[in-house]
Image (cartoon, grey):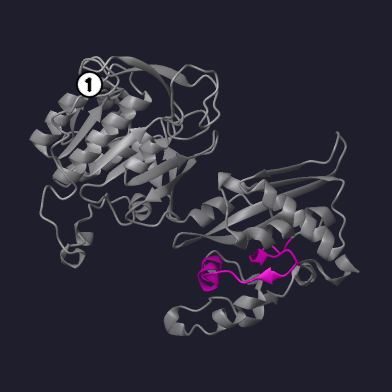
Amino acid sequence: MAKPRSVYVCQSCGQEHHKWQGKCGGCGEWNKLVEEIRGGDSGGGGNPSPSKSSGGYGAEGGDDIQKMADVESGQADRLSTDISELDRVLGGGLVPGGVVLLGGDPGIGKSTLSLQVAAILASQGRDIIYISGEESLQQLKLRAERLAVDPSEIRVICETSMERVDQLLRREEPDLAIVDSIQTITTEELTSSPGSVAQLKEVTGTLTQLAKGLEIPTLLIGHVTKDGAIAGPKVLEHMVDTVLYFEGQSGVDHRVLRAVKNRYGSTNEIGVFTMTGDGLEEVVNPSAMFLEERPAGASGSAVVPVVEGTRPLLVEVQGLVSQTEYGPPQVTAVGVDQNRVVLLLNIIEKRTGLKVAGHDVFVNVAGGMRVSEPAADLAIAMAILSSYIDRPVPKESVVFGEVGLTGEVRAVSKAGDRLREAANLGFDSATLPRGNADGVSSRDDSEEGPAMEADALDYCRNLAHAIRTLFGDDVLS
């Protein structure tokens, strides 16, 4: 029998240390090391003895080796949730045997969304088991009544023991299992506390093994840390098939569901919801929602059509440039990369001669959206310059394009889709890269070409050209 020994495991990254120390040598976090006992008796150590599930289900249920060409894709077997925004992010629905990890800040709507999904599928005759490790059955019933969902067909159980959850899933083999939350489930094979690295790895591994072997779609709800990442080591995200984050800001009703990992679909798709008194509601037209409070005739505002996955969205980029009065000039960015904003400011000064230096610069994406694609460069630059010279960007015009270091405006993908979305919301002109001219004009009517008139499209070669187009020739004179 191995002699018990102590190891110290970082609760942030999972790295093990032979002795306690204040700072983790892996991730650099302070005061994250927790002692675990390894070896010794099978029931008293930090390492589990071989459990009854360890020799059980493989990904194919123990089938013989096959040629990949002979394996059925199972694409048609996806389980649609009937919530189009969620299905979009999942890549078409839940995959049999797929494990989805849903994270987000407390109160953001994770449990609400899960309960709504359970109610919809149960009403269709699906067998749904909701495993709650945080709420009592009475609390679940109260939440269901508040959300006005029909809980009559949802089977619920309050359980935190992995061994009993294992037996339950093997016996019932439901159409969908929901675990709320993964941090509350523990295995008796380990002595460490709930939510520890060892518990999370063992419990998630067992649930993933069950899901693959029994082909049960499984939704795991995860807590997040103060930094917004799912609590536990990164290995937890590697063990599951899909990782979704629910994002939102305090004081803002809308929520954005974003995939950061998806083995069965794109990680660029987003779903948009609004939190109401009756739960989460889908936002059919997110562009209209993000622009509904845009001020008319105000400087420092530009609308850019961005593409999230396959969906074009119109968002408002706001810029504010003011003379520095309180210490050194500062650059602040919300919703866009601050380093990108600094880069654009330097390009503006170098390539146009406009001296923005010595001013405080603030950039914000209205509505709490986050924009990362380079196609927003031109809109960010125009919003900043609009505030700097105090001239508004034409209200019914959209702006997009990537700005290079030499000041050139470079072509972006899906220009036609961006223009159609803009036209659908009433925009009648656009400033875009000259490199997109051939691609836009070559699309015929059968391909749903641009909905804007050709003479309403201003193709720009460089940043100076875009400034003259939007603000007049005198700006750079």
Position of 267 compared to 314: left or right? left
Report if residue 416 lies within the magenta region: yes
Q: Can you give x and y, in whole percent of width and height, for residue 10 in the image?
A: 45, 25
Q: Is residue 353 above or below residue 291?
A: below
Name the residue located 14 percent from the left edge and 43 percent from the top edge: 214
Q: Can you give x and y, in whole percent of width and height, for residue 163 in the image?
A: 17, 25
Quarter of the rendering occupied by the N terminus = top left
Residue 20 appears anywhere in the view? yes
Out of 37 and 162, give the one closest to the viewer: 37
Q: In which quarter of the image is residue 70?
A: bottom left
Position of 14 compared to 400: left or right? left
Q: In this view, does 354 lie above or below 5?
A: below
In this view, the residue farthest toward the left is 171
Which residue is under mark 1? 189
In this view, the residue farthest toward the right is 477
Q: Can you give x and y, in whole percent of width and height, for residue 83 in the image?
A: 32, 50
Which segment did they paint magenta? 393-422
Count of marks placed on residues = 1
Q: In this view, does 359 lie above or below 421?
A: above
Name the residue located 17 percent from the left edge and 45 percent from the top edge: 58
Position of 244 compared to 69: left or right? right
- The secondary element bearing badge 1 is classed as loop
Out of 4 and 225, give the one closest to the viewer: 4
Out of 76 and 319, give the one closest to the viewer: 76
Q: Can you give x and y, in whole percent of width and height, for residue 117 in the image?
A: 28, 42
Position of 106 compared to 127: left or right? right
Name the residue located 83 percent from the left edge and 41 percent from the top edge: 329
Quarter of the rendering occupied by the C terminus = bottom right
Q: Tell me the amino acid under the disc marked 1.
A: Glu
